[in-house]
C-alpha cells in the first residue's frame, strides 16, 4: 500500500523542482522519516525503521500480471505522454484509453505479525493527486495524473508528482507560493480483473475502467474506487457518469445498449498535507539527516 514516505517523496520532488535544488531519493526519505518519527516516539520509530528498511532493500518485480491488466497494457499506445483526470472533484478521475491515467483508492488492513508478510511493493501502477485545501471550499482538485503501467516507485513517484502538478492540462502549473495549501495523495493500484458486466463491482471497493465503441469511435475512461461513494451515486449512476466522462452523448436510458468492456480494480492510497512535509523537511535540514 502507499505510505507516508511515498507522499513525502512526492512533495520533496515538487518542492525541489520549484526551488531549483536536488531532491532527496526515496531511500533517503524513508530513512530520514524513520529517524524523524523515532525522535518523536522511539517505540513507533523502531517499527517504522524496520518497515522502511524492508521497502528500500527489496527490488522485486510484480509477481503476477492479471489478464485484465495485461489487456490494458496491450491495448494502449506506446506513447508515454501523460493523460489527466477529467473531473473537478478532488477524488474523481476519468481518462481516455492510454498508458497513463488518474486514480484514487482505499487502504487495506495490514497482515498480522504472525502471518507471512508479503514482499514489499517496489513497483506498481500509480497515481499522484494534488489537492488545494481551502477553509471556504475544502478540498479542490489541483492535478491528477498517473499510469496503469507498473512503475519503479523511486522513479515513477517523482516523475508523476511533477507531471500531475505541472502538466495537467485543465490547470495552470502549480507554483511555489501554492505549496502551503497543498495536499498530496498517492495511490497504488492492485487487483485488476475483468468484470462480467457493468454491474459486476462493489461500491467503495472497486475503481472502474471502461471502454466501448459508439458510432464507430472508441471511448474509454476510469473512476477511482472512492468516487461513487463520495458523490452518493448508485452503481448505475456511476456507470452512466463514467460513460459521459468518456464522451458518450447517447440517451441516458439507452446506456445498457452499449457494449461496455469493464475492468475493475482496487487501490491502496495514502495522503499527506504540506504542513507535515514541512515539519519533517525542517527537521532534516536542522539535523543534516540526508545521506
Image: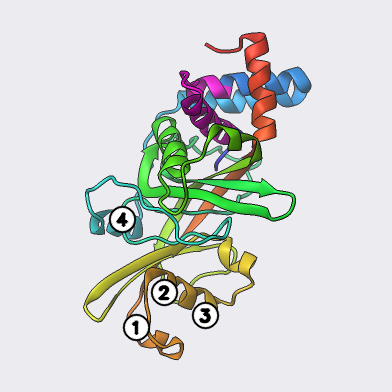
Q: Earlier in the sequence, mark 2 or mark 4?
A: 4
Q: Residue at x 58, y 19 (%)?
A: 31
Q: Residues within 10 Å of mark 3 (few under 14, many from 20)?
A: few
Read off the residue under disc 1: 258
| Residue 110 x %, y % | 63, 43
Chain-order first, disc 1 or disc 4? 4
Q: Which residue is mark 4?
A: 98
Residue 9 within the magenta-colored segment of the rendering: yes
Local packing at callout 2 (Cα closer than 10 Å; few below 14, some 14-19, many 20+) is: many
Position of 147 with respect to 114 (left or right) is: left
Q: CA distance from mark 2 to mark 3?
A: 11 Å
Report which residue position mark 3 lands on.
236
250 lies left or right of 201: left
Secondary structure beneath dot 3 equals helix
- Label drawn at residue 243: 2
Between discs 1 and 2, the one toward the N terminus: 2
C-beta proximity under 8 Å, tags 2 and 3: no
* Left-right relation of 35 to 227: right
Q: Is residue 162 above or below residue 95?
A: above
Whole-angstrom CA distance, mark 2 to mark 4, is 16 Å
Label pair 1/3, CB-CB below 8 angstroms = no
Amino acid at each position: 500500500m502507499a505510505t507516508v514516505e511515498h507522499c513525502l517523496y512526492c512533495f520533496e520532488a515538487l518542492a525541489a523542482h520549484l526551488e531549483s535544488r536536488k531532491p532527496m531519493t526515496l531511500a533517503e526519505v524513508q530513512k530520514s522519516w524513520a529517524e524523524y518519527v523515532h525522535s518523536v516516539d522511539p517505540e513507533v520509530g523502531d517499527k517504522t525503521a524496520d518497515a522502511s528498511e524492508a521497502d528500500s532493500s527489496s527490488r522485486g518485480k510484480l509477481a503476477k500480471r492479471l489478464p485484465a491488466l495485461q489487456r490494458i497494457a496491450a491495448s494502449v499506445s506506446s506513447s508515454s505522454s501523460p493523460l489527466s483526470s477529467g473531473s473537478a472533484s478532488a477524488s474523481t478521475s476519468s481518462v481516455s484509453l492510454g498508458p497513463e491515467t488518474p486514480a484514487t483508492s482505499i487502504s487495506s488492513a495490514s497482515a498480522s505479525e504472525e502471518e507471512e508478510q508479503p514482499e514489499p511493493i517496489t513497483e506498481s501502477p500509480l497515481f499522484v493527486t494534488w489537492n488545494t485545501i481551502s477553509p471556504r471550499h475544502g478540498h479542490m482538485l489541483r492535478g491528477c495524473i498517473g499510469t496503469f503501467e507498473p512503475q519503479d516507485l523511486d522513479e515513477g513517484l517523482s516523475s508523476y508528482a511533477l507531471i500531475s502538478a505541472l502538466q495537467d492540462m485543465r490547470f495552470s502549473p502549480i507554483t511555489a507560493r501554492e505549496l502551503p495549501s497543498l495536499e498530496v495523495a498517492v495511490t497504488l493500484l492492485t487487483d485488476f480483473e475483468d468484470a462480467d458486466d457493468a454491474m459486476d463491482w462493489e461500491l467503495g471497493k472497486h475503481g472502474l475502467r471502461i471502454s466501448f465503441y459508439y458510432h464507430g469511435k472508441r471511448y474509454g475512461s476510469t473512476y477511482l474506487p472512492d468516487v461513487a461513494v463520495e458523490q452518493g451515486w448508485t452503481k448505475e449512476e456511476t456507470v452512466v457518469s463514467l460513460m459521459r466522462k468518456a464522451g458518450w452523448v447517447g440517451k441516458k436510458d439507452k446506456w445498457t445498449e452499449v457494449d461496455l468492456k469493464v475492468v475493475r480494480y482496487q487501490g491502496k492510497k495514502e495522503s499527506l498535507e504540506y504542513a507535515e512535509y514541512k515539519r519533517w523537511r525542517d527537521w532534516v535540514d536542522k539535523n543534516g539527516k540526508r545521506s
